[in-house]
Structure formats: structure tokens, C-alpha cells
Image: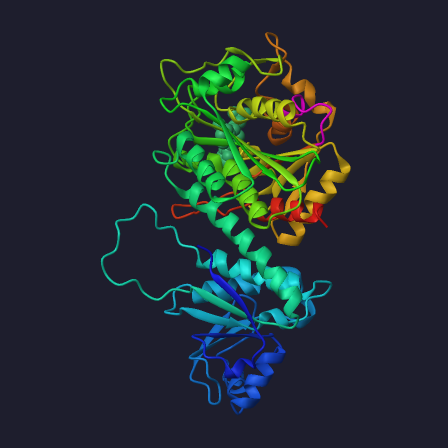
Amino acid sequence: MALDFSLTAAAPETVDTDCLVLGLFQDGSLGTAARQIDQISGGAIGRVIASGDASGKLGSHTLLFALPGVRATRVLLVGLGEPAKFNAGTFHRAVHDSMRALRNLPVDNALSTLTELEVASHDFAWKLRCAALAADAQAYRYTATFKPRSEAEPKRLARIAFVATDEAAGQEALTQARAIANGVRFARELGNLPPNLCNPAHIAAQARTIADQHAGVSLEVLEREDMAKLGMGSLLGVAQGSANPPKLIALRWQGGGSAKPFALVGKGVTFDSGGLSLKPGAGMEEMKFDMCGAAGVLGAFLAAVELKLPLNLVCVVPAVENMPDGNSYRPSDVLTSLSGLTIEVLNTDAEGRLILCDALTWTAQTFDPQVIIDAATLTGACVVALGKHASGLMTQDEELAEQLLAAGTRTHDRAWRLPLWDDYQSQLDSGFADVANIGGKYAGAITAGCFLARFTQGRRWAHLDIAGTAWEEGRKGLATGRPVPLLTQFLIDRCA
Ligand code: BES
Ligand code: MN
Ligand code: ZN
């Protein structure tokens, strides 16, 4: 469950809250609410600044208790950095920092005044939604596979209020924030779940729950035999080494009359061992996150349905496990895809494109969508190219590129475009089939995109490589829920 978000028009000093959040710039200047609180409390904030206990540096924060004339139990002073450099990026950073500071405090509710700070060319609705999503992202905890605690749980942030400067715009922003937060939480939870629990059948069951809980949503799940009849030799090749049977999952939302649907397709490899081209042991555990594309498109679908967006949407997830086995597909196998193109497998670890190509062909054939967007943890090369901050965007459609980049910028779920020029296609030449499944040592993210492009000819299609952005690395790294914000914003924008 996402946090409870609300608006308040009351003067901040009169609000009974566990924590009042105020902004402080590095030059000692204060936001409107902070200035007001300083006056009411007889200069208490000014004294904390003068003593050097609060610097206003970006990333810093200071916790104060029992200010005279202020009803809040605590006041959190959040550093905003230099006023001249305060922009959308530093605002985003400050709202995340403030909520991270609350994470481990025994605080059940808070009131943030940061949404009243001026951010050049960003309106109140943007600031509010950004702050609400930051609060929810920082409050999230993964608990699914720990022993249940018997002691009483400590207080944790459950409710957050924001100072309202525009009630109507504020309510709409919070409605969007709730839907996106629920989508992000869904994606994070599914991503974090271990692969012995989160297998293809579990993802199908999650899709079933989404369909059961929302009017207007229908679900179809193709089993191995259904896919065999259709001729999805590429997807089934990957799946054949696993004891967990594959599922091809399709959710539909009918919100837009007879218009052609938008289609989201997400890579759902519930564990990627590499198959016979086995991955090294170190870091292999991170490959439980190889279904984060699936989690992301399902999360965005959930958000779109919760917002009842007036459009038609399909969400397709090929869910498989990539395992070494006596029955595994092998390097040098030639697979016949649903499209009819044959594929020479030169590395069984390049499995994502092999399940996506059949899912993309099927999506195009079955739903005749106006746009197809896939999201996939597709290549380590994308992480080398762009690091952990930007998802890789590949498309030959200029307008679609602009729209997706804009949606990513607005939600701070950013993508960066890589070229999909035909010049790269020859790297996929094969002596034994129409196409090889790997493209050599250069431009691995792009050649993976080029492979998918062969299966989306004549379609408006874009590919998001989220290998770097879908989870935080390290032993305690969690799924991020990206690209749920980007995809949901893209869909919201198509309704404007
Ligand atoms: N799921 C991986 C990509 C990946 C690797 C994502 C590391 C995040 C971190 C994908 O299936 C894969 O193994 N790709 C190979 C492709 C190669 C064999 C051409 C890769 O990136 O090494
Ligand atoms: Mn792989
Ligand atoms: Zn993979």
C-alpha cells in the first residue's frame, strides 16, 4: 500500500504533525513557510543557522524539537543548496533527501512545505507529484521474505500532507501520484521477490489478480502448447531448459472505444542463469531482476487502469526462466520464430531478445496496436554505455522518441537515446540462419535493439533497455520500479 497523501490549507505552525519539513538554502535564506515558522518561534531557526548546526547544503538536514509556538513534534530543516542553482533536479534531490531522513524516525505522519518553493518552469502539480512519489519511494520497505516479527513494529511513515497552493490542481496531481506510486510499488515488490517464488506462473497469477480487481480489464494466458501451435519457436527455445513452464501473458484495458491500442511488452525472465552459456557465479543472484521489464509494464498498466485513462492498452509479458539442463537449447541451435525468420543461437545468454521477438510479433498480429513500447533488462552493454541513471531508448520513430524522452524528463525517470541505424545490422549476420542472436563486441545495446527492430518492421515501436535502471546494485539493492513513471506519464500525455 502506498502512503496516504493529502493536502492542507492550514497554517503550518497550527498543524498537529509528527514532523514538519522546511527548506533552508545555503545562503541562510528560507522558504516562505520556514520564514513564517522562524518568526513565530522567535527566531529559533535563525539561531540554529547561526550556530552552524544547519548549513543548508544540498543533501544535509537538521532535526529540531519543540519549537515555541509550533504544534509539530519535530521540525526537519532540509538543505536546498545555492538559491541560484535551485531547479527541478535539485528539488527532486531535496524531496528525496528529506524523506530518506524520515525513514528511520518513529514518525507516523509528516507535513512537507517544500512544494511551495519556486522551481523554474515547473508548476505546483509537478512539484506536488514529485514530492509525493519521493515520499512513497523512500517509505517503501521490502518485507515479503523475512520471518514475521513478533515484537510491536516501530512507527513508520504512513501519511504525508503537503501545503496546498492550488487545491484543484493539487487533487489531480495527488490522484496521479497515487496511481504511479501503486504501479511503482507493484513493480518493486514483484522485482524483489526471489525467483523460486516469482516464476512465470507467479507473474501470470499477479496478472490474474489485476484483471480480477479491475472492471474493464481482461486477461489471456498462453501456455506452452498454445505457443507451440502458433509457432513461437524462439520463445520456446529459451524456455525448454526450465522446469518452470513459460507463460505468455496479455492484459487488456478498454478505456478508449474503438481506437487502436497502445501496447506495452516487458521482458519477463524470472531468472537468467545464462543457460548453457552460463553466467559467472559472482553477481548471478542479480539475475532475479531480469523480469523487471515485465514488472514495469504491469505496473504502468495498473497505474493507467487506476487512472481510468481514456485509451485502449494491452500489456504483454513473455515470462520464462533461462536455465542449463539436459533439455536446454544450445549455442548453434537454429530456432524458427513466429515471424518465420530463423535465428542462430550463438549465445544462450542473449535470451531476452529471443523471447521478445516472438512476443512483439504476436502483439502486432493480435492487437494491431498504434504504438508498441517494450521494456527489458536486455544488455550489460547498456549499463556500460549509460550507467545507472538513464535507460537506453532506441527507436526509428522521431516523434515517439521525443514523447518518451519528455515523459522521462518530467518524471525524472530519464532515458537517453541510442541510434538504431541500419549500419549496425550487419553485425547480426549469420551463416546458418536469417539472423544471429548476438552482434559481437561493439555496441551491444544497439545490436540487441537492431535484432528487435527486425521483428517490428512497419510498426511504430520503441525499445527501452532498463538493465541499468531497474534495480539498485549491491547486496541490499532493491528494484526501483523504473520505468513505471516514464511509461505512465507517456500514456497520460497521450490523453491530453
Ligand atoms: N539479462 C541480461 C542483461 C543484463 C546483464 C542486465 C547484466 C543487467 C545486468 C541479458 O540476458 C544478457 O545476459 N545479455 C548479455 C548479452 C550478450 C550475451 C550478447 C550481456 O549483456 O552480456
Ligand atoms: Mn542473458
Ligand atoms: Zn537476461
The answer to whether residue 221 is above or below residue 293 is above
Q: Which residue is painted at 54% across and 22% down in the image?
A: 354
Q: Is residue 434 above or below residue 132?
A: above
How many numbered circles are shown? 0
Image location of residue 317, percent across then percent down: 52, 31
Give the camera-side residue of 383 and 302.
Answer: 302
The single residue placed furthest to the top in the displayed view is 432
Magenta segment main secondary structure: loop
* Closer to the camera in the image, 310 or 277: 310
Viewer-closest of 397 and 466: 397
Tell me if I can see residue 261 in this picture. Answer: yes
State the image coordinates of residue 359 (x, y, percent, origin top left).
57, 25
Query: Residue 6: percent from the left, percent from the top?
Result: 53, 67
Segment colored magenta: 452-460
Q: Is residue 218 above or below residue 358?
A: below
Tell me if residue 345 can be seen: no
| Type of colouring | rainbow
Name the residue at 58% across, 61% down. 174
Residue 198 horizontal side relative to residue 469, left or right: left
Q: Residue furthest right?
A: 398
The quadrant of the rendering that contains the N terminus is bottom left
Question: Is residue 430 rendered to the left or right of residue 282?
Answer: right
Residue 413 image point, x, y percent: 60, 49
In the picture, measured across the screen, residue 260 lies left or right of residue 50, that is: right
Which residue lies most toward the left here?
Answer: 150
In the image, residue 297 sits, relative to residue 110, either above or below, namely: above
Say if the magenta span includes residue 310.
no
* In magenta stretch: residue 456: yes
- Identified at 55% across, 84% down, the residue is 37
